Amino acid sequence: MMSWPPLLALLIALPLTGAVLTPAVSRSHKSVAHWWALAIMLVTSAMASLLIMRVYQEGPFSYVIGGWIAPYGIELRFDEFSAAIAIICLLGTLAIIFSRHYVTHAIAEPRIPYYYTLLLLNLVGMIGFTVTGDLFNLFVFMEILSLSGYALVAISGERIAEMAAFKYLVMGAVSSLMVLMSIGILYALTGSLNMADVTSRLAGAPRAPIAVAFGSMTLGFMVKAAIFPLHIWLPDAHAIAPSPVSAVLSGLVVKVGIIGMLRVYQIAYGSGAIDMSGLNMVLMWLGALSIVMGAFFAVFQDDIKMMLAYSTISNIGYIVMGLGLASTYGVMGASIHVFNHALIKATLFLGAGALIHQTGKRTLSELAGVGRSMPFTAAAMSIGAISIVGIPPTAGFLCKWFIALGAMQAGHPFFAFALVFGALFIFIYYIRMVNAFYFRPPGDPSILQVREAPASMLVPVLLLATLCLVMGLLGRVPLSFIEPAVNRLLLPLGGG
């Protein structure tokens, strides 16, 4: 019988070791870095698949490193929410494949090995953040992915990229300090950093410092998730970064804030130490505001990646609103949207990267008519567009439908209206994109002479677009997987 706990530890150790060794392995030939990083992610993905099968068949499990029990040991825990590593591994692998030709034009050759090092570090930070059962290591892994994210935004060395990375760093540092302060308060109250142990010890602690800790930690994670109005770092960082990095940042990195909030809720609801209804109301309103404002700003963008960046803010609003509703349908919809939005946004950002790589243009005005010369890329992005609007039977429909049901279930029909209103806004700006691709005459005749991107770039985009359709048709599959975790989360509230 396979020993699962060592495999769980290896899930972190392998990509971390691979990241550190990348510059040495590729010292003689820079191209080796790509194949090395790809091999590391393929093996990591295989291990993740085995662990996901294990949790699906037998339920959550834990591994305490070195056998030291709480509060001294470092625990790794794998539950249904940890299955988010499936999308981390998928998008990470596809981003590496896409990068093979892309980075040769976007990044100076001496920096290419360090690009793959940083990308692997970013992915291992997300994996570790998702499976750790220890609050301090939650912070450590968050810093690994944050610091590597700042560097990836600035990897091109251009002045504008460095300024975007600096803005990202400043906001990220503030949020990290808030999370660290909260962890310190919880440790002072309980004498433990183990999440399960903290949950069991919080019941008799004073309410005021608990409220400060949970409030501060949630606010810190909201900055990571780029919820409006804490979003100011996101548009520049996502628009200016290399497109594979943009896909990872938008599809995965901002979700770290959501997963962090889920962990806060597991502790808060599990301990029953504090009433979260006030915080939930704040999250609902900020979610609704993000949906509308993110979509509103996206409508006025001509730069295709800037439009996609503001769209991320809008869609994070759906997820935060679903969590704030604290109803079974709302939290299920939010959890599924973490997965589906990652697929959709990776489709769109990688598709945009392919367009920019082939044409050298990045505004909708300049890309008018590109659907005739790059039909497969344009079709994939169109599928991503209808998916993110939430048109059935695409991946975006089920999650938004469940969040709307969650609003009705929680007795807040206004937020269902905000969801629909935001979807109409989203429809407007994605129709602009599709219209530019297919129905507007080319402003530059040379746009009709370009060819499709190389297979290493086109295949990931087409695969992701296909998954946007497949996950719409097979939406019950992730739903059946995540439902037990949501029910356990909301059990102290009477099931939502």
Image (cartoon, helix red, strand yellow):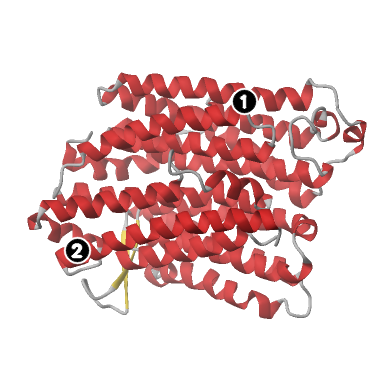
Number of dots carrying numbers = 2
Other residues around mark 1 within 10 Å, as few (<14) / some (14–19) / many (≥20)? many
Instruction: Answer above or below: position of 292 versus 112.
Output: above
Instruction: Tell me: 161 left or right of 484.
Output: right
Name the residue located 70 percent from the left edge and 62 percent from the top edge: 157
Query: Percent from the top left, x then y, of residue 148?
Result: 55, 64
Q: Kindly tell me whether residue 392 is visible in this rendering.
A: no
Name the residue located 37 percent from the left edge and 22 percent from the top edge: 416
Query: Which picture quadrant has residue 462?
Result: top right
Instruction: Answer above or below: position of 110 versus 374.
Output: below
Query: Percent from the top left, x then y, of residue 386?
Result: 60, 26
Quarter holding the C terminus is top left
**Nearer to me, 217 or 77:** 217
Name the residue located 29 percent from the left edge and 52 percent from the top edge: 216
Quarter holding the N terminus is bottom left
Instruction: Answer above or below: position of 30 versus 223.
Output: below
- At label 2, the amino acid type is Asp
Judging by the rendered image, the residue that carries numbered circle 2 is 197
Judging by the rendered image, the residue that carries numbered circle 1 is 429
Query: Percent from the top left, x then y, of residue 251?
Result: 54, 46
The first of marks 2 and 1 along the sequence is 2
Tag 2 and tag 1, C-beta contact below 8 Å: no
**Nearer to me, 260 or 47:** 260
Q: Nearer the viewer, mark 2 or mark 1?
A: 1
Instruction: Tell me: 173 left or right of 352.
Output: left
Query: What is the CA distance from the residue labelled 2 to the residue labelled 1?
Result: 47 Å
Query: Which picture quadrant has residue 445?
Result: top right
SS for dot 2: helix
Query: Percent from the top left, x then y, of residue 176?
Result: 39, 60
- At label 1, the amino acid type is Tyr
